[in-house]
Amino acid sequence: MTGQDFDRHSDRHAGQEGEHFTSRWNHSPDVPIAVSPLFSWPLDLVAIARWMLNQWLIITERSLLILISLASWVWFQPPLEVMATLSIDWIVMLYIRNMALMVLVAGGLHLFFYSLHSQGERLRYDSRALEQLQKNFLFKNQVHDNMFWSLASGVTTWTIYEVLMFWAMANGYAPVLLWSEHPGWFIIITLLTPIWISLHFYWVHRWLHWPPLYRLAHALHHKNTNVGPWSGLSMHPVEHVLFFSSILIHFVVPASPFHILFHMQHQSLTAATSHTGYQAMLIK
């Protein structure tokens, strides 16, 4: 076989493989994937302003997270003075609240997309069923495996970080920002929180693909080649520790309890919303 024959054979084989791979996909998004104007160069200030308005001032995932965080702060959050002393009472309260939020969001999305099939296959990337009877998943069931890691490790690590931050703020080890004293900075920290989370996640994710760390921790998350809402927070405990460590910036950057709640809930709940396996949710 000549070099040209080999090249033609390789191209034909690659084309067949590509067709086979493409045939697995039920929905393909438009490409190239649009990126935030924050990461487009040169910076377009008008585009950035429009993007920020669309992120915060209409009904979006982010604005709903703000409402969830406000509700958590007002109705389901002990005062800082109570959290100055470590107590099983308020720690369990935080754990139950976080567990309930994860079950409601991830469980609700799974119910909508996979149990009730409310959207059918519309905008679904991969129409294959979620894995069952597979030995590489706990309980030989992908959903049960994902629920275990999300709740047993994910919610536990999430709560431990919250306990650390609230206790530190209550005892003066982490700076506290009050709306009554600095409303402008209060808003700015809120707006910057998702950007910081994204930046931190980018570098942590790159680190997790370092082969030794990938084999130790990140491979567990990547068992999910076809994802569902419970897949997002399904991680090895080591990865959870790294994933949530972005909150430690508030040992330097002042924050209120609301910012801690918004930060942690943003990380946890968007893990579910970004792993539904669908491009979007269609609302009638």
Image (spheres, rainbow, N blue to C red):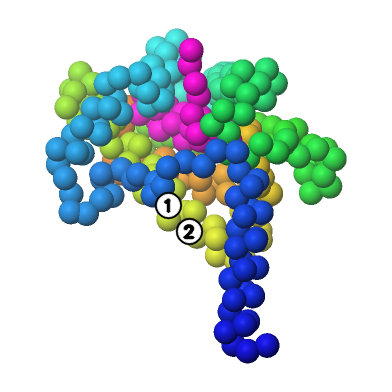
Q: Secondary structure at mark 1?
A: helix
* Image point (65%, 61%), residue name: 16
Q: Residues within 10 Å of mark 2 (few under 14, many from 20)?
A: few
Whether residue 112 is visible, yes or no, is no
The residue lying toward the viewer, choosing from 31 and 255, is: 31
Q: Secondary structure at mark 2?
A: helix
The three-letter code of the residue at mark 2 reads Arg
Quadrant that contains the N terminus: bottom right
Q: Is residue 190 left or right of residue 47?
A: right
Residue for badge 2: 206
Residue for badge 1: 202
| Quarter of the image where one finds residue 229 | top right
Look at the image and give the residue range highlighted in magenta: 258-284
The residue lying toward the viewer, choosing from 225 and 213, is: 225
The residue lying toward the viewer, choosing from 277 and 185, is: 277
When the figure is inspected, residue 105 is found, relative to residue 225, above or below; the finding is above
